[in-house]
Amino acid sequence: MRELIKKFWNKIKWILFLTIWTAGTIGWMYFYQEFKIIRCEASATWTHVQSIQEQRKENKNEDDAPAVESKDEAAREVSLEGEADDTLSVSPPSIKEMADKIRILESSGGKNDSCLSKGLINGYGFRQSTFDWKCYNSHAEVRTEVENWIKDKIAKGYDEPTMLCFYNRGIKTGDCPYYNKYKTL
C-alpha cells in the first residue's frame, strides 16, 4: 500500500507543482495590474481631497481675517455698536426663501432625501459630504441649522452667489452651476 502511494505521489507531484505555480503566476500578474490601477485611483482621490482641504483652509483664513481696512470703517463700527444689528443685508423672509430653494436643489423638496431610509431627515444636503453625512431628527432642526449657517455667512460679508457656491462646493467662488440653477427657481 505504501508503495502505491509513493508511486502515485511521484507521478502527480510535478503536475501539482506546475498547476499551483501557474495559478500563482497568473494570479500575481492579474492582481498586480489591478492593484496598480486601484493605487492610481486612490492617489488621484487623495490629491483631490488634499486640494479641497487646502482651499477650505484658505477660505477659513479669509473668513477669520478682520474686515476693517481703514480708521473710518473702524469708527463706523464703533458708532454702530449701540444701534440695532444692521449687519444682515438680507431680510429674514429672504433667508427663508433661500433655505426653501436650497431644499429644492438638494433633494427635490425632500423627495430624494437619503436620510429618510434611516428614519431621519435632512433634505438640505447640510453637512453631507465625503467627510460627513449628518441626518437630523426633525425638519425644524435641520432648517434652523441651515438658516443659521446662511445668517452667519451673510454676517461675514458673503454675497448670495458666493454663499450658495460655498454651501454646495465648499469653495469660495462667485460663479458655479449650483447658483445658476438657484437663480432659475
Image (spheres, rainbow, N blue to C red):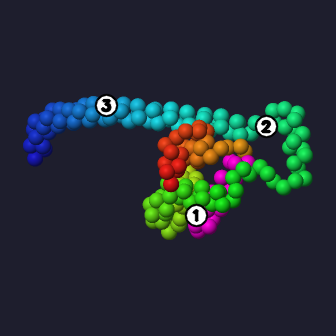
Tell me the crowding category of disc 1: few under 14, some 14 to 19, or many 20 or more residues within 10 angstroms, Cα based.
some
**Label 1: which secondary element:** loop
Report x, y in % for residue 56.
62, 38
Residue sitting at 10 percent across and 40 percent down? 8
Reading the chain from its start, which is encountered first: label 3 or label 2?
3
Report x, y in % for residue 174.
59, 39
Magenta region? 137-155
Residue sitting at 44 percent across and 36 percent down? 42
Camera-near label (1 vs 2) is 2
User: What residue would you read off at disc 3?
Assistant: 33
Can you tell which quarter of the image residue 93 is in?
bottom right
CB atoms at circles 1 and 3 under 8 Å apart?
no
Residue type, mark 1 in image: Tyr
Report x, y in % for residue 158.
67, 43
- Is residue 21 placed above or below 128 in the rendered structure? above
Camera-near label (1 vs 3) is 1
Check residue 136 in the rendering and tell me which mark sits there, or answer none: 1
- Is residue 121 placed above or below 166 in the rendered structure? below
Camera-near label (3 vs 2) is 2
Reading the chain from its start, which is encountered first: label 1 or label 3?
3
User: Is residue 133 in sight in this rendering?
Assistant: no
Residue sitting at 14 percent across and 35 percent down? 15
| Residue 101 falls within the magenta-colored stretch | no
Q: Nearer the viewer, residue 184 or 164?
A: 184
| Distance (Cα) linking label 1 and label 2 | 34 Å
CB atoms at circles 1 and 2 under 8 Å apart?
no
User: Is residue 153 in sight in this rendering?
Assistant: yes
Residue type, mark 3 in image: Gln
Tell me the crowding category of disc 3: few under 14, some 14 to 19, or many 20 or more residues within 10 angstroms, Cα based.
few
User: What residue would you read off at disc 2?
Assistant: 66
Reading the chain from its start, which is encountered first: label 1 or label 2?
2
